[in-house]
Image: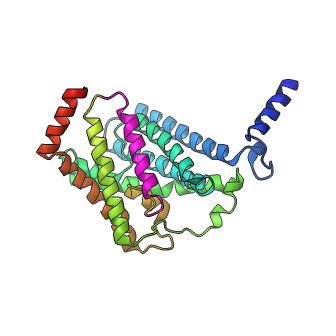
Amino acid sequence: MKASTQLYHLLQTIGVVRYSGKKNIYGLHPLIISAAVITATIILADLIRKLLNVILKETIAKEIILEFLATAELCACCFELIVVADNYGVLTYGFFLFLLTLWWSSVWEDATACPYSLVEEFLDGYKTLSTTLILIASQVLGGLAVYSYVQSIWKIQLAETHIGLLGQECVADLAVPFEYGAAIEGIATFLCRLVSRILGETSLRCAHVLDAFFATLLVLAAFNFSGGYFNPALATSLKFGCKGNTFQEHMIVYWLGATLGAVASLYFFKLPFVQRRLDKFKEKYD
């Protein structure tokens, strides 16, 4: 009993459990509760993924379901990350996003949770047009459907930062003219995909860490301008229909801008001078 009391006082001292028990479950710090919600979400998704890998054969149906699941997981976590960003700043948001990106790169396997990745595979001849469109539709549906899961968590009000969220008006993140927003999403996606491709061609042990770190930096750089989504399905899940953007603006910024940036990086990467420089790098460091 004495040991448990001492532990509780220690947790109070470091700020883990000194918050109101009426507004925060067990008096935990709201940030810890958000972290727990995100952790529970990725564990649940991973368990479902493992089960699906056991019971489903390698068919297009399995690919559709896994894309639905990955996008739902991504969007559910990012809904909670919005809470983190609004209450604890973009650096805290970036730290969580970096860790999540590392996790997803290790467990998603062939799922992308991102429409333009499928477009790239189509342009490279790995997928048919019909398959690409079906998979993109499954991603969008996953991102939209998961809001019911998010609502059920926020409705419980586990933390004071969840109170009132369901009654808040959704406001778009685009803080610049939509033409600039499309350029920001496009250029950032171009850089993100280009660096990812280059790192993927190297044998650097920390390539996946560098990739996640660079992507997170780009998100933080664009956060106060376009929201830094760089993923059409994610942007649609979190911000479609929100006050401040028309349908056309949303599609141009988050779908057209990001997709054009990704496609441009695909063809830029294939240019001879880029390949020559990459070969020299690989000869020197691999």
The residue closer to the viewer here, 231 or 152, is 231
**Residue at image point 32% right, 36% down:** 58
Q: In terms of depth relative to the viewer, which is nearer, 139 or 206?
A: 206
In this rendering, position of residue 158 left or right of residue 102: right
Q: Is residue 209 visible?
A: yes
- Which residue is located at x 31 percent, y 59 percent? 186
Give the residue at x 31% y 42%: 196
Query: Relative to residue 241, is residue 47 depicted above or below?
Result: above
**Most prominent secondary structure in the magenta stretch?**
helix
- Percent coordinates x, y for residue 91 in the rendering: 54, 49
Residue 55 located left or right of residue 243: left
Highlighted range, magenta: 204-225
Residue 221 lies left or right of residue 194; in this view the side is right
Q: Position of residue 67 (x, y in %)?
A: 39, 46
Where residue 185 sits, quadrant-wise, is bottom left
The image quadrant where one finds the N terminus is top right
Q: Check the picture and name the quadrant holding the C terminus.
A: top left
Farthest residue toward the front?
A: 284
* 213 magenta-colored: yes
**Residue 114: percent from left, percent from top:** 36, 51
Above or below, 188 relative to 215: below
Q: Is residue 131 visible?
A: no
**How many labels were placed on the picture?**
0
Kindly identify the residue that appears in the image at 30 percent across and 47 percent down.
Answer: 193
Pinpoint residue 207: horizontal percent, then vertical percent: 35, 33
Q: Nearer the viewer, residue 103 or 283?
A: 283
Residue furthest to the left: 272
